[in-house]
Image (cartoon, rainbow, N blue to C red):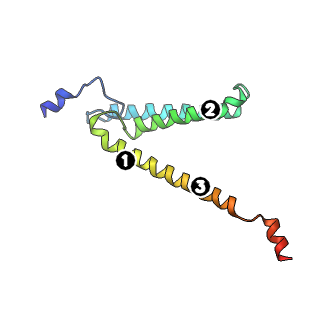
Amino acid sequence: MSELHELHDYRDVAPGDEEEVRVGPRLLGYVVGLGLAIVLTITSFFVAGTDLVWQPSIPVALVVLAMAQMGVHLVFFLHITTGADNTNNVLALAFGLLIVFLVIGGSLWIMSNLNHNMMPMDQIMQMQR
């Protein structure tokens, strides 16, 4: 057990990855994460609904804010860190993302193929006459 504590650098601890059992630091991590998530959500709505931002850059800004919010959720709520004990969590997250992208990509591919190979409706109506 002492070797584990010697290998663990106490300065390299992410929010929510504390080894303390006390509720205070954990609650503070959740409150900070909630605050950041709320700020990022409000910022996204502000960027989408205002004319203060250059109009062609709005999609890029929304993607950047969404990625920042995903990072906040991963670190503060799911406790995904770079520690050695989180390898299984990171692998499970990567596998889940792979499955999601395969399902979405496969669905779009199938729908595109069906759209390309289907006969237009006006030709079907002409054949029925």
Q: Is residue 83 left or right of residue 60?
A: left
Name which residue lies at 55% across and 31% down.
Answer: 39
Mark pair 1, 2: CA separation: 28 Å
Residue 4 image point, x, y percent: 17, 32
Give the mark toward the camera: 1 or 3: 3
Residue bearing the label numbered 1: 92
Around disc 2, counting alpha carbons within 10 Å, would you say few (fewer than 14), some (14 to 19), or many (20 or more)? Answer: few
Give the mark toward the camera: 3 or 2: 3
Residue 30 image point, x, y percent: 41, 35
Residue bearing the label numbered 2: 60
Mark pair 1, 3: CA separation: 25 Å
Dividing the picture into quadrants, the one containing residue 62 is top right
Residue 109 disc label: 3
**Residue extending furthest toward the bottom:** 129
Mark 1 element type: helix
Mark 2 element type: helix
Name which residue lies at 43% across and 49% down.
Answer: 96
Name which residue lies at 50% across and 31% down.
Answer: 36
